[in-house]
Image (cartoon, helix red, strand yellow):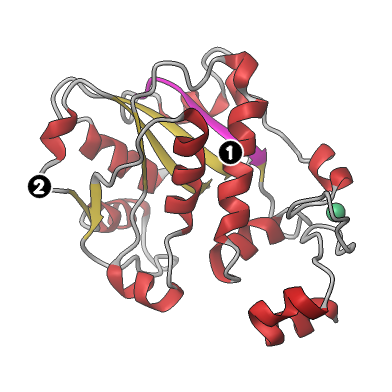
Amino acid sequence: MLKTIRQWLGAAADVVLPRLCPVCGKALDDDEQWLCRKCLADLPRTHYEDAPFNTMEQHFAGKVPIERATAYFFYEKGSPYASVLHDIKYHSSPRMGQWLAARAVSDMAASHFFDGIDIVTAVPLHRSKLAHRGYNQSEYLARGIADELKIPYTEVLKAIRPHTTQTHKGALERWQNIQNNYTLKNDADRLAGKHILLVDDVVTTGATLTVCSSLLKTIPGVTVSLFTLAAARLD
Ligand SMILES: [Zn+2]
């Protein structure tokens, strides 16, 4: 109920209503940001970054040469944590994503996952979707990481066609469809020899990340690593 009122009130809600944890719905304490302490502690972490040749890296092996890949937490439809992703994408809470991504960097410090990365970029959103939503959630995630690492965020890829619903299509058709959705920006070659971290909100089939990584790999001497905020269980 509070959540509905909040959506209806928009930004004014912060003044008159308590901020809520999107996972459990509890009112946040003054020193809690975005998620309550308990839900943050219970975040279903993948810990992929701690394992050599982890499940996510295996998923992309043979499709596109990836240096390293990780996701911050597991995503399952219906899980209370799915609402975090939903809010980041649709409910004008991209700053929660930015905050969570920055947190992921400090949480993963011991793994050295981010060592050697030169620049951070995001899976782009087509301008029609951008106009509708007002922001690209993956860009916020990428900026959160770049700021925390004190390295540049830059746009390298361009979405040239809107993402269409593909449920009725076969795997090959789906693949070809996604392949035609993206291209490199004209000045991409300035990143020759760099280690690029490509960021998206969630990995499910990995098709979009494969297509975007393959494009990045056409820049001479480029190394690509992947970060997503969440991952479906990839087996
Ligand atoms: Zn909570």
Q: Quadrant of residue 68?
A: top left
Which region is colored magenta?
Answer: 66-73
Per the model, the C-alpha gap separating discs 1 and 2 is 29 Å
Q: Which mark is residue 186?
A: 2
Residue appearing at x 25%, y 23% in the figure: 194
- Mark closest to the chain's N terminus, 1 or 2: 1
Left or right: where 73 falls relative to 33: left
Amino acid type, label 1: Ala
- If the image is split into quadrants, where does the N terminus sit? bottom right
Task: Find out if the beta carbon at label 2 lies less than 8 Å from the nearest ligand 1 atom.
Answer: no
Image coordinates of residue 81 in percent, x first then y, are: 74, 53
Q: Is residue 205 visible?
A: no
Q: Quadrant of residue 164?
A: bottom left
Residue appearing at x 77%, y 61% in the figure: 22
Question: Neighbour class for label 2 at 10 Å: few (<14), some, many (≥20)?
Answer: few
Residue for badge 1:
102
Residue appearing at x 23%, y 35% in the figure: 216
Q: Quadrant of residue 178?
A: bottom left
Is residue 67 on the magenta stretch? Answer: yes
Dividing the image into four quarters, tell me where ligand 1 lies. bottom right
Residue toward you, 130 or 15: 15
Amino acid type, label 2: Asn
Q: Which mark is residue 71?
A: none
